[in-house]
């Protein structure tokens, strides 16, 4: 009874990871198509938990080997573990090779690609890091792009040009990120 519940849980987990894997895979395909149109890019950052991801991948590979090779069970009995291994051990590391930044027709943000035509709002957050905050037109979510300081001026110029070319339909109003300094209004 407990074994069947665990197997069902791992199957459901595998389906969730399959969806996440397909999303990352679609992003990697999109990157392969877009990378030739790079205008200003830089390497993405590793997640803080990257080492944990790699440890999980190793542990999952050992579980898969034990489940399939040692016990002789069919490969599909390890579907959940395989999907988690693909996520942590293959696709997340591959997605880190995607260069963040400005492309001919859009931005590659920390959370994926967004075409310029889908940008509804922009704001810069200048603190310990320089972050471009982007609001997509038809979503309530906010995306961010950490811009290296040595690319900041060029990034601003590219955005001004895209706005001037009406590729970004921007009203000029910034987002309230809590960083407004009223002294700048004077």
Image (cartoon, helix red, strand yellow):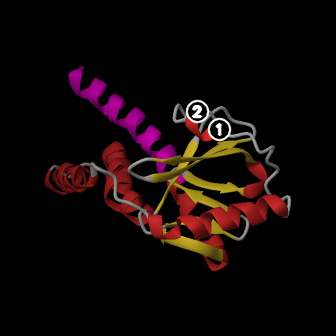
Residue 80: x and y in percent read: 35, 43
Residue wearing tag 2: 182
Magenta range: 1-23
* Quadrant of the frame with the C terminus: top right
- Decide: is 46 above or below 32: above
Tell me what residue is drawn at x 24 percent, y 20 percent. 1
- Decide: is 80 above or below 167: above
Residue 102 placement: quadrant: bottom right
Residue 154: x and y in percent read: 60, 70
Q: Is residue 7 left or right of residue 101?
A: left
Q: Nearer the viewer, residue 119 or 186?
A: 186
Q: Secondary structure at mark 1?
A: loop
Residue 153 disc label = none
Q: CB of mark 1 within 8 Å of CB of mark 2?
A: yes
Farthest right residue in view: 166
Q: Nearer the viewer, residue 57 or 155?
A: 155
Residue 163 placement: quadrant: bottom right
Tell me what residue is drawn at x 65 percent, y 72 percent. 33
Residue wearing tag 1: 186
Residue 164: x and y in percent read: 83, 61
Residue 21, magenta (yes or no): yes
Q: Main secondary structure of the magenta part?
A: helix
Residue 55: x and y in percent read: 19, 53
Q: Nearer the viewer, residue 92 or 86?
A: 92
Q: Secondary structure at mark 2?
A: helix
Q: Is residue 154 left or right of residue 73?
A: right
Question: Is residue 136 in sight in this rendering?
Answer: yes
Q: Is residue 125 left or right of residue 58?
A: right
Residue 78, magenta (yes or no): no
Find the distance from the CA under tag 1 to the CA under tag 2.
7 Å
């Amino acid at each position: 009874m407990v074994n069947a519940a665990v197997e069902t849980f791992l199957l459901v987990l595998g389906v969730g990871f399959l969806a996440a894997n397909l999303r990352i895979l679609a992003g990697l395909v999109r990157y392969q198509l877009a990378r030739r149109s790079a205008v200003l890019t830089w390497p993405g950052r590793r997640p803080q938990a990257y080492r944990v991801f790699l440890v999980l991948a190793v542990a999952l590979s050992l579980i898969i080997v034990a489940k399939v090779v040692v016990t002789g069970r069919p490969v599909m009995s390890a579907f959940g573990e395989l999907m988690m291994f693909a996520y942590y051990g293959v696709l997340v590391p591959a997605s880190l090779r995607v260069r963040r930044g400005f492309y001919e027709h859009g931005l590659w943000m920390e959370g994926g690609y967004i075409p310029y035509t889908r940008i509804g709002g922009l704001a810069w957050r200048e603190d310990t890091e320089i972050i471009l905050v982007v609001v997509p037109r038809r979503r309530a979510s906010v995306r961010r792009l950490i811009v290296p300081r040595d690319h900041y001026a060029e990034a601003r110029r590219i955005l001004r040009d895209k706005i001037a070319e009406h590729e970004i339909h921007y009203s000029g109003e910034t987002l309230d990120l809590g960083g407004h300094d009223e002294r700048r209004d004077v």
